[in-house]
Image (cartoon, rainbow, N blue to C red):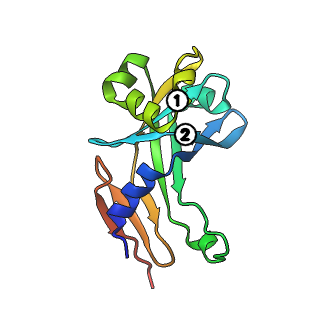
Amino acid sequence: MEEPREALHALLSEVPVASLAVTTADGPAVSLVPYVALRAPLRIWMLLSDLAPHTAALRTQARCAVMVNAAPRVGDARSNHALARVMLPMTARFASRAEGVAEGADAAYRERFPIAETLLGLGDFHWVALTPAGAASLVLGFGRAYHAVGPDLEDVSAVRTGA
């Protein structure tokens, strides 16, 4: 059985797309957004377009959430309920292109996503750095729920029921 801290770091480093939850003028909204996770301390970096509603929402309200999940396994009916996933409450901050380079987001994004060269050539794309703003909720299957806190989510503890 995989250790929770290792599973959390694997999700953030191996899964290339996250669900980004924001609050728009019309209410809650969720988008799928490619990202890279950098550590020491943990930051989720996204390259967002001005054409996307989530970008405008983050300019108005920096509070958001990110969920990263493992892919369901075909033919495994239990996987939909026991899917490995982490939900992170976050605070978004728009960063300059120079900061993206200095922090390593630019290089990591280019390595993970070949389309980065094209996107970074467009003026409507901006770096956004997301910082954890509370405990992450990690689920690794039935009866395996955890909270993770700390600069790199290194302090992981099991969630206990009142039973």
For the residue labelled by badge 2, is the local secondary structure a helix, a strand or a loop?
Answer: strand
Name the residue tied to disc 1: 47
Give the quarter of the figure containing the C terminus.
bottom left
Give the quarter of the figure containing the N terminus.
bottom left
What residue is shown at x 53% (from left), y 60% (from top)? Answer: 70
Q: Do tag 1 and tag 2 residues touch (Cβ < 8 Å)?
A: yes
What residue is shown at x 47% (from left), y 78% (from top)? Answer: 143
Does 20 sit left or right of 135 as displayed? right
Residue 101 visible in the shown view = yes
1 up-or-down from 152: above or below? below
| Residue type indicated by callout 2 | Pro
| Picture coordinates of residue 80, whole percent (x, y) | 63, 70
| Residue type indicated by callout 1 | Leu
Does 14 sit left or right of 41 as displayed? right
Q: Which image quadrant for residue 108?
A: top left
Q: Which image quadrant for residue 3?
A: bottom left
| Picture coordinates of residue 33, whole percent (x, y) | 58, 40
Mark 1 to mark 2 CA distance (whole Å): 8 Å
Name the residue tied to disc 2: 34
| Label 1 environment density (alpha carbons within 10 Å; few <14, some 14–19, many ≥20) | many
Q: Nearer the viewer, residue 83 or 59?
A: 83
What residue is shown at x 58% (from left), y 60% (from top)? Answer: 71
Residue 129 visible in the shown view = no
Does 139 sit left or right of 60 as displayed? left
Which residue ends up furthest to the bottom in the rendered image? 163
| Picture coordinates of residue 96, whole percent (x, y) | 42, 18
150 up-or-down from 120: above or below? below
Q: Nearer the viewer, residue 130 or 120?
A: 120
Q: Which image quadrant for residue 81?
A: bottom right
